[in-house]
Amino acid sequence: MITSTLRRCCRRATTTSAAAKQSNIGSCRYISAQQLDSDRQCRQSPLLTNNNELSAIVNSFPTDGVDYAFGYGSGVLKQQQSLLSDDAHSTKPGMVDIILAVDDTYSWHKRNLQSNTNHYSGFARIGGSSFVYWMQNLGARLYFHPFVTVDLSLSNDNKHQRTTTQREIKYGVISTDDMIEDLTQWKYLYLAGRMHKPTVEIENRKHEIIAKAQHQNLLAAVSASILLHGGVDDDDDDSLPTTQLYNTIAGISYAGDIRMQTGAEDPNKVKKLVETPGMLGLWDNMYSTIFEDLQRLGILSMNNTKLDLDFNDIGMRRELMKNLPQRLHSDKIVGISHSIDSIIQGNELLRNELRRIVAPAAKSQSIKGLFSAGVSKSFNYAMAKFAKGRLKS
């Protein structure tokens, strides 16, 4: 049964799932499929799909070995559109983005090549599962299929009747181990960065392991973002609006991303991810547990929609640094007591380190797409993204 990292967009009470009740570790409490659908009735709900569609999409693939699946992007969660954009006036459903984490990528692709051959590029069909497995392990360890049309058979209110429809999707495949590694170590900050933002969970067969890894990922995202706001020499400004913090978090995975630098991505994307009506509540729900943890540790206090803390306190900065992946542990990032300049230098060092993680992974994934998706699909996808970026700049 589909569950979701969404909670009520309307401020109503929710019922936690049994898995969530058993553990407080995780980004938020999960809601049931029925709650997910009823959320769509909220006036400002950002959800564009329903549990039937998302589950049917995942079930169109080999389900054996799928440990985790989630939906994301503008075809799943509403994002504000430019008035000049064709998307603003189109009634056609947007592309649905899906990530599948599987226990064995070689075996999974071998089965998927047999059942969904047309999803793969000519290179992949010729090279077979061995070629696909080799490509899988390049870049950020994700293998994407864009512009795939799937035929879905959906149940309606009358359970004895079904309707058929088509949806255009892009789906990425990653091994569960590689996903956990990125969440906990920020090896690529590719999938980990995607999971800094609200997503819709479709399948989770390893709740405890994945929830623990995601908790580390979100704690590191908050800690890094707070550190980046240090160095302001203003004793009267010891608060940070959560909206501003969320914008910083959303921007982490775009640091050094070649798509942003070349205009192949909407320059207002970060703002839209946070400030589209209905989305802010999802961010609040996603990070509430992290804020509660940091508040218990005395690092910050919550004041309505603001975080109160001393950004330049070296002890606090050191504790936040410990929440980052090991590769980002450095006294230089922390700074020196009573030295605003050293804190500013530490922030710049952290920004540069984040760029050094993101840039190579983003670049290699873009190049990899020429072979995994095929030249034609990769070109069409790049042109669509580039057109959106140019139109909205």
Image: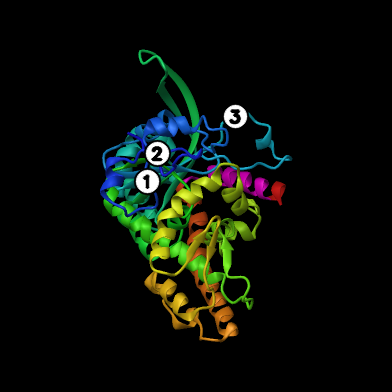
Q: Residue at x 57, y 50 (%)?
A: 274
Q: Main secondary structure of the magenta part?
A: helix
Q: Is residue 265 visible?
A: no
> Which is nearer the eye, 289 or 56?
289
Q: How many marks?
A: 3
* Point 62% across, 70% down: residue: 237
SS for callout 1? loop
**Circle 1 Cα neighbour tier, 10 Å, few/some/many (<14 / 14–19 / ≥20):** many
Quarter of the rendering occupied by the N terminus: top left
Query: Going from the N terminus, do you reach mark 2 or mark 1 first?
Result: 2
Residue in view at x 40 percent, y 22 percent = 153
In the displayed structure, would residue 386 be above or below residue 170? below
Q: Residues within 10 Å of mark 2 (few under 14, many from 20)?
A: few
Residue 29 badge: 1
Whether residue 235 sits left or right of residue 10 in the image: it is: right
The x, y position of residue 174, in whole percent, is: 37, 51
Q: Is residue 338 above or below residue 294?
A: below
Are dots 2 and 1 in contact, CB under 8 Å? yes
Q: Are marks 1 and 3 in contact (CB under 8 Å)?
A: no
Residue 69 located within the stretch drawn in magenta? no
Residue at 56% across / 31% down in the picture? 93
Residue 379: say if magenta.
Answer: yes
Q: Amino acid at mark 3?
A: Lys
Q: Secondary structure at mark 2?
A: loop
Q: Quadrant for residue 322, please give it.
A: bottom left
Whether residue 315 appears in this view of the structure is: yes
- The magenta segment: 373-389
Task: Say if 240 sits above or below 134 in the image.
Answer: below
Could you say where residue 97 lies in the image, as x and y percent from the top left? 48, 41
Q: Which residue is mark 3?
A: 92
Amino acid at the residue labelled 1: Arg
Task: Give the residue pinned by disc 2.
Answer: 14
